[in-house]
Image (cartoon, helix red, strand yellow):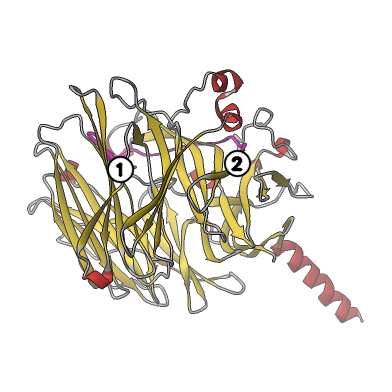
Amino acid sequence: MKNITTMLLLLFVVCAMNAQGKLGPITISYGQEIKENKEKIVRIAGELNGKIYTLAQKGKKKYFLKMFSADKMEVLGKQQIEFSEYKGKDLTFEEIIVIGNKIYAFGSLYDRKAKENHLVGFSISEDGKLSKKGKILFNTKVTKKRERGAFYFKESPQGGSLLIMHAAYFDKKEEIQYEIKLFNENLEAEMTDLETVPFEDRRDLEFNIADFDVNVYDDIFIVINESYRDRKAKKNIEKFEIHTFKKDNGYKKEIINIDFTNREVINCEILATNKDILHLVGFYSGVRKNGKANKKLRGIYSANVDMRSNEVMNLKFNKFDYETKVKLIGERRAKKDKDIKPLYKTHSLIEKEDGGLFLLSEYQEVFIGRSQGIGPLAVQPITYINNEIIVTSLNQDGSIAWTNVIPKEQKASFTVFSLGIFGFFGGNNFTVGVGISIPIAVAGKGPEYLSAIPIYENGQLTVIFNDNKKNVGVTDIEKIKRLGNYNKAIPTAFVFDDQGNITRLDPEDLQKERLILRPGVYLQKSAGDYIIYASKRSKNKLGRLQIQN
C-alpha cells in the first residue's frame, strides 16, 4: 500500500507539472522541461518517424536543430546548423522545411562577381546532422547586392512539394523580376518560370505579387495586381490576374482575368481546394471622381474560379456593415460612412464545411526606430502592435454571412542588430504580399507571443490568443485593457457560433507560474491537434493543444 501510494503521488505530481488546464473543450498539455533553454525555438518544422524537428536561435546568427520525441516531447538531441563555405563565403540562413519524408535547411548568398543571388539547400539526416554538400536551387541574375531581392517559400498542402519564389526590383533598369520553381522531396525542380515586368515610362504603376500558392495536384497559382491612374480619362486602371501553371498541362502558363471597375484591390489571399476551386479574398478600396484610389478599406471582395474551365464564377464586393465599422473606427466616424485605415493583414483563410470561407484579418503595425551604435554593434529598437482581428464568415457564393471582431490589444518591444533585419518586401511601387509573418531575424525576440491560433473543428471556429488577465470575461472592444507585458498573459479563447456570436473562454485558475503560449510558433498536425511552444522566464516546453470532438 505504501508503494502504491507513493506511485500515485508521483503520478499526480507528473500530471500536475505537464497539465496546463483547459479552456472549455480545449486541452493544453506540455512535455518535459527543456533544460538547455538558451536557444529559443522559433519554428516547428515538422514531425517525421516519431521525432519533432524544431529550429532554435541563439544570439545574432546561431541556429540550431532541436529534436524531440513525439510522444513525451522530451529533447532527443541538438545540432548547430553550420553551412559549409560556399564560393569561399558564409551563407545566410533562410529556413528549415520538411518536404515529404525529408528535412532541409536553406541558405542564400549574393555572388558579387557574377551578380547573382543564390539559394542552396542542404539535407538533414534523421539524427539532425547537416550535409556538407548543398544543392544549388537558384542562381538568379540581379543588378547589385542592394537589389538582390528575397526568397519566399510555400509548402504544398500534402507536404510533398515546395514552391519557392525569388522577387527583386531593379531601379536603374526600371524592371521587376520574379522567378518561381517547384521542387519535389529530392530538391529536383519540377517546373521553373522567370518573368520580367518593365516599369519604363510607367512611374505611377503599382505592381503587387499579391499571393502565390500550390495545390494538392501540384498546380501553381500566382496572383498579380497592377494599378495606375489614367490622368486624362480620370480613371483608375486595375489589372487583376491569376497566372496558373497546371501540372496536367505541362505547366504551360495560363492567364485568368478578373474584371471590375471603380475599385482597387488592396491585398489578396488565395486558397486552392481539392475540388478544383480557387478562392480569392481580400480588402478593396473605393476610387474618387478624379480616378485616384483612396487606399482605405471599403470592404471585402471574394472571387471563386473553376480551375477546370478557368471561369470566374462569383465576384462579389461586400461593404463593411455599420456594426463592424462602429467596433473598428467608432460610432461618429461610422455614421459618416468613413472607410477603415489599411492596417489589417490577412492572418488566416479557412475553408468551411459548407464550402464557404472564414477570413481572419489582424491589425498590425511595426515601428522601427533609429539605429543606435556604430557598425556591426549597432542595434535598432522595434515595436510590434497586434490588435483586433476582423472575423468574416463568407458564404459559398462570396456573400457575407456575418462579421464580428475579436477585441484585443497586444504590444511587444525589443532591440535587434540593425543590419538587414527585414530583408526585402518590396519598394518603388513594387510589393510582395506576405500576410502576418515574423521574419527569422526577429523571431524569438517577442512578437511570437502576439497574434493568435485559429482552430476550425466540427464546423466551429475557435481563436486562441494571449490576453491581459484584467480582460477575463470581457468581449466589448471599448472595455479591454492592453497586453503590454506578455510575461503576465493568460490564454483565452473566443468561440463563434453559426451566427457569429462570441463565447469567451478563460482559464478557471489564473496560475502565476503558468507557461505563456507563443502563437507565432506552432504546427498544425491535423484538425484539432497542434504542436505548440510555451515559456515562462527560464522555463520552456513543447506541448500539444487539442480540441475535443
Q: Secondary structure at mark 2?
A: helix
Q: Residue 453: horizontal and vertical position, in percent?
A: 56, 52
| Residue occupying the point 66% across, 51% down | 498
Q: Residue 406: horizontal and vertical position, in percent?
A: 61, 40
| Residue occupying the point 33% across, 68% down | 218
Q: Earlier in the sequence, mark 2 or mark 1?
A: 1
Q: Camera-side residue: 393 or 141?
A: 393
Amino acid bearing label 1: Asp
| Residue occupying the point 33% across, 42% down | 422
179 magenta-colored:
no
Q: Is residue 9 visible?
A: yes
Q: Quadrant of the N terminus?
A: bottom right
Q: Quadrant of the C terminus?
A: bottom right
In the image, residue 257 above or below residue 202: below
412 magenta-colored:
yes
Q: CA distance from mark 2 to mark 1?
A: 45 Å
Q: Residue 13: horizontal and vertical position, in percent?
A: 78, 66
Q: Secondary structure at mark 1?
A: loop
- Which residue matches tag 1? 259
> Local crowd at mark 2 within 10 Å, few (<14), some, or many (≥20)?
many
Q: Residue 542: horizontal and vertical position, in percent?
A: 58, 62
Task: Place residue 198 in its image quadrant.
Answer: top left
Q: Camera-side residue: 128 or 394?
A: 394
Q: Camera-side residue: 363 or 2?
A: 363
In the image, residue 267 above or below residue 350: above
Is 137 positioned to the left or the right of 531 in the image?
left
- Which residue matches tag 2? 486
Amino acid bearing label 2: Tyr
Is 292 positioned to the left or the right of 441 in the image?
left
In the image, residue 509 above or below residue 390: below
Q: Is residue 80 visible?
A: no
Magenta residue span: 405-432
